[in-house]
Amino acid sequence: MGNYNCNEYIRAGPYVSVWQRKEDRYIEEGKLEIRTLSYFVGYSLAAQLISEMTYGKDGLVKLVRFKVDDSVSLVIDRAKNNLLNKIYTNDFGKFDINFVNETKNSLGEVIKTNVAYDGFDNEGILLVVEQKRKSGFEKPYVVTLAHYYAINSSFLFGWKTYDAGISMVVNIRVFDNDLDVICEGSSAHASWAFLDMFQHVSRTRFWRWMTCPYYAAETDRRERSGMNSTQVKNEMEAKLENDDEEGTSCEKPKQRGNVLANQGMIKGRNNGNLVVKNLYLGRRNQ
């Protein structure tokens, strides 16, 4: 039946809260680790992130499953030669706006990005799945998933306002035949920054990591500190383990292994790391 633990409640913004829950189940294959992050706006569930990680009896991670709104499922599993199998995002078609970008970087790597968005002027959810493969290969060597939620809405004749922006970014690759999963978040941001990003993405049908205000702000900070554009690029590449100059995500430097060392929403300082497995992202009923 497993062990149920790690219930925490955090205030993310005015009338917006986050619950965290962790559960371990011991199964025939080994262990199933489930983590759930639930975002509440008032008393309504606005978004729920559930990750499910399957460990083999050898202790290695075999598979990570992410679900979105009960109807979207993303599965990441190992292939041979330290590669990942392709991620299928057919269910993104259920979102109001969805598109695919495919670009190449200076190293000749192909970057395929699937984006899905649902929302309004004052509330929305954005999902991003990026698969990066090296030249000459059909399968990706690294996958990045991002989830952004934001709301800025008044009620009771403007006396009270829901106001929060929350992000989660997950980076997955294979290391020594083990799925390495590193997650940034959940982290709090200004709601207007994400709402502007949502409108930009829905209007242009294009995504790059510089669109993320957190990534852009970090780049701007480095440039203001006196670093030139080449130094900024080199530092970001080093922090992302020599990924391309576009940056793989809004992440901090990676940590090896599956960790729960968060000082973001869970510890209340809004800038932590959290390993997440099986992602469910729900939308609040209107």
Image: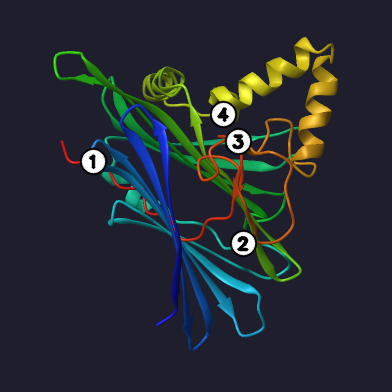
Which part of the image, by quadrant, shows the N terminus?
bottom left
Q: Nearer the viewer, residue 84 or 150?
A: 150
The local secondary structure at tag 2 comes to loop
Calculate the distance from the C-alpha at mark 3 to the C-alpha at mark 2.
28 Å
| Of pointers 4 and 1, the one earlier in the residue sequence | 4
Residue for point 41% across, 17% down: 192
Residue of label 2: 84
Q: Position of residue 160 (x, y in %)?
A: 24, 19
Answer whether residue 75 is visible to the viewer in this image: yes
Asked if 175 appears above or below 3 in the picture, the reply is above
Calculate the distance from the C-alpha at mark 4 to the C-alpha at mark 1.
27 Å
Calculate the distance from the C-alpha at mark 3 to the C-alpha at mark 1.
25 Å
Residue of label 3: 271
Q: Are marks 4 and 3 in contact (CB under 8 Å)?
A: no
Residue for point 82% across, 38% down: 238
Asked if 36 appears above or below 127 in the picture, the reply is below
Asked if 14 appears above or below 253 in the picture, the reply is above
Left of 82 or right of it: where is 146?
left
Q: Amino acid at mark 2?
A: Leu
Identify the image's colour scheme: rainbow, by chain, secondary structure or one colour. Answer: rainbow
Answer whether residue 107 is visible to the viewer in this image: no
Residue of label 4: 208
Calculate the distance from the C-alpha at mark 2 to the C-alpha at mark 1.
33 Å
Instruction: Kindly report which numbered mark, 3 or 2, lies closer to the viewer in this rendering.
Output: 3
| Of pointers 2 and 1, the one earlier in the residue sequence | 2
| Numbered mark located on residue 126 in the image | none
Q: Nearer the viewer, residue 123 or 145?
A: 123
| Of pointers 4 and 3, the one earlier in the residue sequence | 4
Q: Position of residue 24 (x, y in %)?
A: 48, 73
Residue of label 1: 284
The residue furthest bottom is: 28
Q: Amino acid at mark 4?
A: Arg
